[in-house]
Amino acid sequence: MVEEEAREQERLAQEELVREKTDEQGNKWRKVYFGGGAHFQNWLEQCRELGEVEIEEIDSTGFKCFEETGEKLYRIWMKEEPPD
């Protein structure tokens, strides 16, 4: 049990380091959400109202509740608009 909790804490710590990315076209994206389920759907709807969104499915290994249920984990990325 302690080992599983430590593994999950490690995965969460790794995820916290993922904040921004740049695509092949040079566009910058900011991570605004990490998770799944109904919360994911709510966040996705709201983000789509605010701008361009990209969804990335994440491997749920190390997150016991997601592994056991087979539920998907996602990141929601918002495209950063260049300053005017």
Image: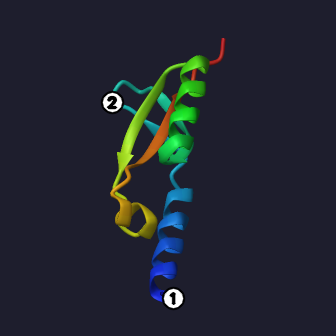
Provide residue 33's location: percent of width, then percent of height: 56, 43
Q: Where 62 sits versus 20, above or below?
A: below
Identify which residue is drawn at 42% across, 70% down.
Answer: 64
Residue, disc 1:
2
Identify which residue is drawn at 45% across, 81% down.
Answer: 4
Identify which residue is drawn at 33% across, 57% down.
Answer: 70
Provide residue 57's location: percent of width, then percent of height: 36, 45
Q: Please say if the residues under marks 1 and 2 sit with CB atoms less than 8 Å apart.
A: no
Q: Where 69 sits versus 83, above or below?
A: below
**Residue 49 sits in quarter:** top right
Provide residue 54's location: percent of width, then percent of height: 43, 30
Q: Where 77 sits versus 34, above or below?
A: above
Callout 1: SS: helix
Q: Which mark is residue 24?
A: 2
> Within 10 angstroms of label 2, few (less than 14), some, or many (20 or more) residues?
few
Is 38 displayed left or right of 23 in the figure? right
The residue type indicated by label 1 comes to: Val
Identify which residue is drawn at 40% across, 70% down.
Answer: 62
**Residue 22 sits in quarter:** top left
Viewer-proximal residue, 69 or 25?
Answer: 69
Provide residue 80's location: percent of width, then percent of height: 56, 26
Is 83 displayed left or right of 63 in the figure? right
Asked if residue 38 shows in the view, the reply is yes
The residue type indicated by label 2 comes to: Glu
Viewer-proximal residue, 66 or 76?
Answer: 66
Between marks 1 and 2 in the image, the one whose residue lies nearer the viewer: 1
- What's the coloring here? rainbow
